[in-house]
Image (cartoon, rainbow, N blue to C red):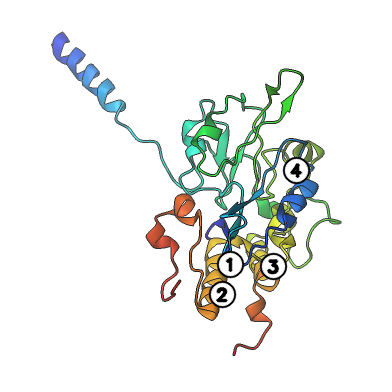
Amino acid sequence: MARMKFICDAERCIECNGCVTACKNENDVPWGVNRRRVVTLNDGVPGEKSISVACMHCSDAPCMAVCPVNCFYRTDEGVVLHDKDVCIGCGYCSYACPFGAPQFPSKGQFGVRGKMDKCTFCAGGPEKHGSQAEFEKYGRNRLAEGKLPACAEMCSTKALLAGDGDMVADIFRQRVVMRGKGAEVWGWGTAYGTNKNAKPEGTRS
Amino acid sequence: MKLQLLMGALALGLLGGCGEKPQNLAEGGGSRGSPAYQGTGVAAFTAPGWKAGDETSWVHELRARGQWGQNEYTRITPR
């Protein structure tokens, strides 16, 4: 297996927010935290584009680099996870992340910032797979159940692709070849390499 | 002699600062917890078609699930 990646196909996303709902439901995400959100560019203008954004599980994750307590780790599948027992909620990762993935639940009258919460690629955390402790802290561990992230599996137009990087890139490349446009993969270059690498070969946009 | 030893120790210390941490895929903070292919042990939620603990079958299951779930071009006849 290469490594797990997300691709959002802006030509297909219809801003239904099904991925956001699926994520919140599957992982029992608390109020005020959205691990995934849909961003629309040029909203209301003909030709507007929407993309679903969450943690991209970057190859060289800036959040890992800036964390002062080293709470982040990367699994063998390339999923960037964090240990909430180590996190001190400093917020450095949220400043470093280009996708605005780290979220902080705020509680109480003064909005005291809690421990960081972010997309886990539905891969849970360091606790025992499928345990109650893992679910309460990180949500479902669908990867260990042999499933892909709920957001991608629930996407009605299959705009959001998740899974092995080679596989999702192949699916996207085939789509671009068939429709003859829309080869831009927003966020792909930032997360996994240069923009040059982001564009599948032999396509026109 | 003492000065040479002192200078040597100082040079080693300074060179140590130039070291680089390993940046392999599975490193950087260290992987924690067991691998995903070990499964959850909860049969009710586990997808059929693979065996917990068998990495190859887990990889194949995820690839197959990704293809038939996300790629409609595998289900239609190309024009």
Chain to which mark 2 belongs:
A
Residue B31: horizontal and vertical position, in percent?
Answer: 57, 41
- Between residue A161 and residue A67, name the one nearer to us: A161
Q: Amino acid at mark 3?
A: Thr
Labels 3, 4: one chain: yes
- Between residue B38 and residue A110, name the one nearer to us: A110
Q: CA distance from mark 2 to mark 3?
A: 13 Å
Q: Is tag 1's residue or tag 3's residue first in the polypeptide sequence? A: 1
Mark 2: give few (<14), some (14-19) or many (20+) Cα within 10 Å.
Answer: some
- Image height check: is A55 above or below A107? below
Q: Which residue is mark 4?
A: A139
Q: Is tag 2's residue or tag 1's residue first in the polypeptide sequence? A: 1
Q: CA distance from mark 1 to mark 3?
A: 10 Å
Q: Amino acid at mark 2?
A: Arg
Q: Which residue is mark 3?
A: A157
Mark 3: give few (<14), some (14-19) or many (20+) Cα within 10 Å.
Answer: some
Whether tag 4 and tag 2 are in contact, CB under 8 A, the answer is no
Instruction: Check disc 3 and report its element: helix, strand or loop.
Output: loop
Whether tag 3 and tag 4 are in contact, CB under 8 A, the answer is no
Instruction: Check disc 1 and report its element: helix, strand or loop.
Output: loop
Instruction: Check disc 4 and report its element: helix, strand or loop.
Output: loop
- Between residue A50 and residue B39, name the one nearer to us: A50
- Image height check: is B40 above or below A165? above
Q: CA distance from mark 2 to mark 1?
A: 10 Å
Residue A9 appears in the rendering? no
Q: Which residue is mark 1?
A: A11
Q: Does residue A58 appear left or right of residue B79 in this picture? A: left
Q: Amino acid at mark 4?
A: Gly
Q: Does residue A78 appear left or right of residue A205 in this picture? A: right
Residue A53: horizontal and vertical position, in percent?
Answer: 60, 50
